[in-house]
Amino acid sequence: MPAVARRPRPFSTAEFPVLDPSQPIEEERWPWYDPKDYYPVRIGDVFQSRYQVTGKLGYGGYSTVWLCRDLVDRGHVALKVCTRNAVPVKRELAALQYLDNLPESTHVGRYFIRTMLGHFELVLPPMDREPLQVFQCLVLQPMTTSVWAYRMRHLEERLAKEMVKAIVRHVLRALHYLHDEAKVIHADVQEKNILFALDETSALQAFEDRERTDPVARKVVGDRVIYLSREIEPRTLGRPTLCDFGEARFGRTTYTGLIQPHQYRAPEVIFGMPWNEKVDIWSVGVMIWNMLEGRNMFKITGGPEKKPHNLYLLAHMVSLLGPPPVDFLKRSETDEPWKYFDAQGKSFVCCTPRRHICADWHATGQWIGAKKLPNDSFELSEENLEGEEKAPFLDFVRKMVTWRPEDRPTAQELLEHPWLDMSAES
């Protein structure tokens, strides 16, 4: 016998803070924001005669995320309402459906990825001679804050080493499952895509109660309302969980095209080479550094305009890793490597719209030329570890952050690295 849906609950009509409609907030701050691309969700709405919106959890580049009360199962879900026609939305739905249809697995890493509970579409009438407006909605498990947001709350913006180890273990187990069993490349492993699971259902009810008694600030623009996000506030954090499959790939062994945030971008991606699951390993190496040191491993901006450019990213890569192997550069079928290196891989050349920068290597491998290479190394950059842990940690990172992807270990191999097992007293 099917479950009987409960009646939707009324939400408070008490006064709420009204924000200046001329000031962009939340998703409006994206450079590509267009209100027509976002479904006008309102708190109190009921979708599919089942999911009642109780508050806004957040937003991303291609979605808004809402906490909903499930009127049938009498629990709560997170509803990701995606923008229309965005490629990452189609990728995420395809990847989550693919994962959902795989044979049941006992692999422990399966429990450290966020799976989909369901999906449906919201449709608005045609507008401005356009066809029907279709918005994909993903029903997901509610989660709490991201690793990045949690780290930003700390004064020094870095995490304790034992917490970093726990996060990395969970992520590597998730990648072990994705790479070895599911044959999926996540392609966007970063702190913002690792959320802490929620073990306390009482925190969800508390979220809903706060919205009733203390409605969140919002702004009204025409016929739509833009809400500020509200956080779920559990007493403890659950397991780190790998989320957001908007860049995920499956079905082949290698791919091409741009992926990863600039500061996380693997060298094979920068140079336009085919890439595989080892891009995820590179990302973990960069991410662990950011978490433990409280700053990005690589700088991507420079010059008076402080704009991101591969020149600065590659300069810092060379500073930390040494020059790239020539055989690696020659794998690219594009001219991208030769914008920065000569045929021997021993020059660093870059043409920008305003200047030409050229620097040569001595036979000893020293950097000379118009642009000074940052005087840096892993040993000099690492500032948060002392004693017996420092050398194993640097070895752990070096294994992941290498020019050649085939030199990077698998997720399973990294789980056996001694640094992850060193005790807090080491």
Image: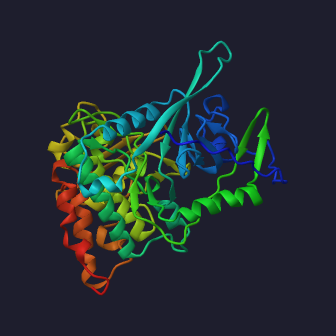
Q: Is residue 350 left or right of residue 142?
A: left
Residue positioned most to the top: 129
**For the C terminus, which image quadrant?**
bottom left
Whether residue 159 can be seen here: yes
Residue positioned most to the right: 15
Whether residue 369 can be seen here: no
Q: Is residue 229 left or right of residue 240?
A: right
Q: Position of residue 110 (x, y in %)?
A: 30, 52
Q: Which is more toward the observer, 408 or 123? A: 123
Q: Residue at x 34, y 66 (%)?
A: 376
Q: Residue at x 59, y 18 (%)?
A: 132
What's the image's color scheme?
A: rainbow
Figure check: 83 above or below 291: above
Q: Residue at x 20, y 46 (%)?
A: 181
Figure check: 420 above or below 115: below
Q: Which is more toward the observer, 410 or 125? A: 125
Q: Is residue 376 left or right of residue 46?
A: left
Q: Position of residue 235 (x, y in %)?
A: 54, 72
Q: Position of residue 175 (x, y in %)?
A: 28, 52
Q: Residue at x 46, y 71 (%)?
A: 158
